[in-house]
Image (spheres, rainbow, N blue to C red):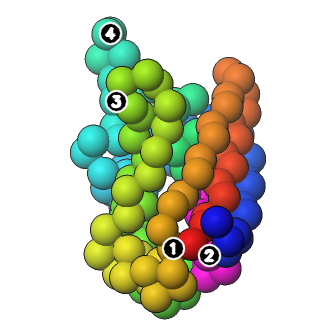
Amino acid sequence: MEIIGIGIDIVEVSRIKNAVTTKKNFLDRIYSNKEIKLSDRGKFRFEELAGRFAVKEAILKAIKTGWRRGVKFNEIIVLNESSGAPYVNLIGKTRKFAESLGVKNIHVSISHTKELAIGMVIVTK
């Protein structure tokens, strides 16, 4: 297993909450419908959204592309297995770019508090 790249990012939960509540289309530009979960009370889980955002940033760092080459945040889909473990699906141009690098696996970890969320990825061949 050859490592292509490692990425890590930390996000303030308040930054994501502010963006969701004040920026038109923020959710659609950044997240897929599957990523947006509401609590039992119908409220956003901002800590989870921030963690997913951090993973998306970490992936861009790991594949060394940033916003270039047609990579889009909403083409990086961060979900959870039934055990709760996070995993990533890539779609569209983002998937094609990752495949051109030889990406076979994306290992991901997310952690958060009420104030901060962190995402770390290791991308391998």
Looking at the image, tell me whether mark 1 or mark 3 is earlier in sequence order: 3
What type is the residue that disc 4 sits on? Arg
68 versus 75 height, above or below: below
- Disc sitting over residue 41 in the figure: 4
Q: Is residue 120 left or right of residue 51?
A: right
Quadrant containing the C terminus is bottom right
What type is the residue that disc 2 sits on? Ile
Whether residue 57 appears in magenta in the rendering, the answer is yes
| Secondary-structure class at tag 2 | loop
Q: Main secondary structure of the magenta part?
A: helix
What type is the residue that disc 3 sits on? Lys
Is mark 1 in CB contact (under 8 Å) with mark 3? no
The residue at the point 74 percent across, 47 percent down is 10
Does the image show residue 68? yes
Q: Position of residue 5 (x, y in %)?
A: 70, 70
Looking at the image, tell me whether mark 1 or mark 4 is earlier in sequence order: 4
Does the image show residue 43? no
Looking at the image, tell me whether mark 3 or mark 2 is earlier in sequence order: 3
Task: Name the mark nearer the viewer: 1 or 3.
Answer: 1
Which span is picked out in magenta? 56-66
Task: Count neighbours of disc 2 (C-alpha within 10 A) and say few if under 14, some if 14 to 19, many if 20 or more.
Answer: some
Whether residue 52 appears in magenta in the rendering, the answer is no
The residue indicated by pointer 1 is: 103
The residue at the point 57 percent across, 29 percent down is 47
The residue at the point 64 percent across, 66 percent down is 1
State the CA–CA distance, disc 3 to disc 2.
Answer: 27 Å
